[in-house]
Image (cartoon, coloured by chain):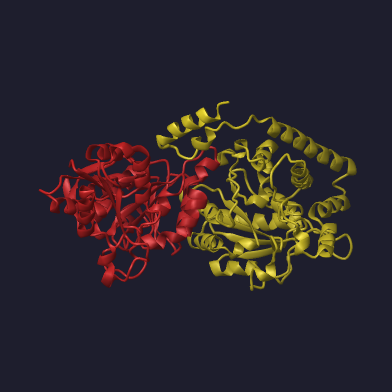
Amino acid sequence: MSEKLLIEAVNDCFHVELERDENVMVMGEDVGRAGGVFRATAGLRDRFGADRCVDTPLAEAGILGTAMGLCMAGWRPVCEMQYDAFSYPCLDQLITHVGRYRWRTGGAMDFPVTIRMPYGGGVKAPELHDDSPEAYYAHTPGVKVAIPSTPADAKGLLASAIREPDPVVILEPKLHYRTMRGEVPEGEYTVPLGEARLAREGTDVTLVAYGSMVPLCEQAADGLDGEASVEVLDLRTLKPLDEDALLESAAKTGRVVIVQEAPRTAGFGAELAAILAEKAILDLRGPVIRVTGYDVPYPYWQIEDAYMPSVERVTDAVRKLLEF
Amino acid sequence: MAQVLPDERELRRVIGDGEGIPDGEVEGLDESDLIELYRSMVMLRTYDERSVVYHRQGRIGTYAIFWNHEAMQAGSVYALERDDWIFPSYRESAIGLLRGMPVSTVLSWWRGHPAGWWNPLDYNVASICVPIATHVPHAVGLAWGKKLRGERAVAIAYFGDGATSEGSFHEGANFAGVMKAPAILFCNNNQWAISTPLSAQTAAETLADKAAGYGMPGARVDGGDVLAVYEATRTAVERARSGEGPSFIEAVTYRTAPHATADDQAAYIDLERVEEEKRNECVGRYERYLQRLGVLTDERAEEIRAEALERMREGIAAAEAEPTADVDLLFRNAYANPPSSFDEELAELRKLLRP
């Protein structure tokens, strides 16, 4: 164990996984010479060579498209999309091929591609550096989606994604790249896809979150200390979802608030709410409440705090639910 | 020797017209090669013509016709080795037949049956790409990945003139140039993208001009001339294999058939021009060339056509004999590690489907 920043945990994972499997390669814009704009891939080019840590042309669909071909040649490419909202051109490949190709070959070929990107707001960045696009990815059949909230999970989930035979999209909370430190196991370390983490135990209400909303929920839970016993469930993987953990917690507390940074309509929170409506209705003592971003473009950063779900909004939702 | 005209804007051709333009020949091809090429073309032609009939009979679904594209497909594949990879679009749906794929597999694909999904590793033929140009980066990635492994395989991607307007074409071509990928970008310019003529697709003088922007050579060949296509592809393969990188080939032909069985081209095309182009279609042109050379007798031609027809008869029979696909195929192949919910969903579905 050693204490690492979240971004250092990502970098550590790469060093371990590229050493472990010579078929793993990293590709993306500025990942080589610069080591990535956030330094996630620092040191890889020097250590493993320019063929395994590839500075690509500036073309996200080209990155993911060629990665599919690299898979067919036996590689396990890890594609970096430089920012959440820069990943949209790659959706063309993701939807038309990445999630379908295995099925198209009758299951004969695997496409072990990993797509990772920094996501989310709160970093006072220009437009289109702040999006939370997880729903686009989670909605695509054939693709798995994970979002870590801690340095250890950032390492462990990425390692699992790299070793997974199916395509996996990893969204990393960029707000916490350099603002969150945590204990990270040394060497090989994986966190299985599809297993949620109980970030905090409680009995009165469950806050369900992932990525950068997890620490926010923990803060809200702290603030409610003495007033309510709040459980925080960190989903870690959106797809496949740990439905058992969700239903178990809902059964225990009977009250669920879902917190999501992305816009509200058809967000991943809506999926969670639907599952609770289908499978937990008799356990619930009040409505499932969502605290989300608004259905607007991510705002100018001077007023971004008003857009982001805040401790106040989460606390308010919890109180309303307790009073229901 | 191919008549490579000094002005590369002209189309390279080998086959003459039996009148003013003399026949050429391609170095390195002997009589058996010439017959093999003919056999490939006849197989593709027979496949295509029978498929239109099968569609009319309701035995296959909507079908993308490739009549008069056979020279481009057969000529280019003949320049490849078995380890080289083919990335077809739907216009090349039957190209796997040239690699030993059963006819029934391709027919099953057009019948919407899972038996039409093949393992690309069995033939080094990728799955049919239905969206336009998005497979170009796949071919480039595979070629690049093979090169990184020190393997000598090259990859060829087939697409139409309309595909050169798609971002994926440009991104793929650019990657190919930058990575010096042993890839061949093969454009079958049949001058129509459904109803959109080439003039509405690009302001470039030729599609081959686009190659310059990606640092690769662009050749223009007569797409109705199987030998010119073969020779241009062979040059591109040699270049790729020797580590010099990718090439772009613009093979120019004319789409004499509708885009697909669901299309009525009378609404937008000049049917007189179509008739004129049909008179010069590629299989007939090659047949007459072989006859002028004295390589192909009527009996041999008839034999080859009969073989192809027989392969089709067996193919459609086998495709129609495929048992109805089980509904578990809905779930089975989407993931290597499927979510546990699939089991429940399948069980529930089975209960409802049970008579």
Give how far across and how far down residue B267 sits, in percent: 76, 63
As drawn, the chain in red is A
Give the left or right position of residue A229, taking residue A99 as reference: left
Q: Residue at x 66, y 47 (%)?
A: B93
Q: Please tell me which residue lies in front, A75 or A285.
A: A285
Q: Please tell me which residue lies in front, B301 or B240.
A: B301
Give how far across and how far down residue B241 sits, in percent: 57, 53
Q: Residue at x 35, y 46 (%)?
A: A272
Q: Taking the image as drawn, is residue A66 in sight?
A: no
Q: Give the quarter of the image for residue A84.
A: bottom left
Q: Please tell me which residue lies in front, B143 or A166.
A: A166
Give how far across and how far down residue A211 sits, in percent: 28, 52
Give the left or right position of residue B324, taking residue A142 as reference: right
- Eyeballing the image, is A224 above or below B346? below
Q: Taking the image as drawn, is residue A203 in sight?
A: yes
Give the left or right position of residue B273, taking residue A287 as reference: right
Q: Please tell me which residue lies in front, A30 or B293.
A: A30
Residue reaching furthest to the front? A324
Q: Give the quarter of the image for residue B27.
A: bottom right
What is chain B's hue in the picture?
yellow
Quarter of the C terminus of chain B within the rendering: top right
Q: Residue at x 14, y 51 (%)?
A: A224
Q: Residue at x 17, y 42 (%)?
A: A202
Residue reaching furthest to the top? B355
Q: How many marks?
A: 0
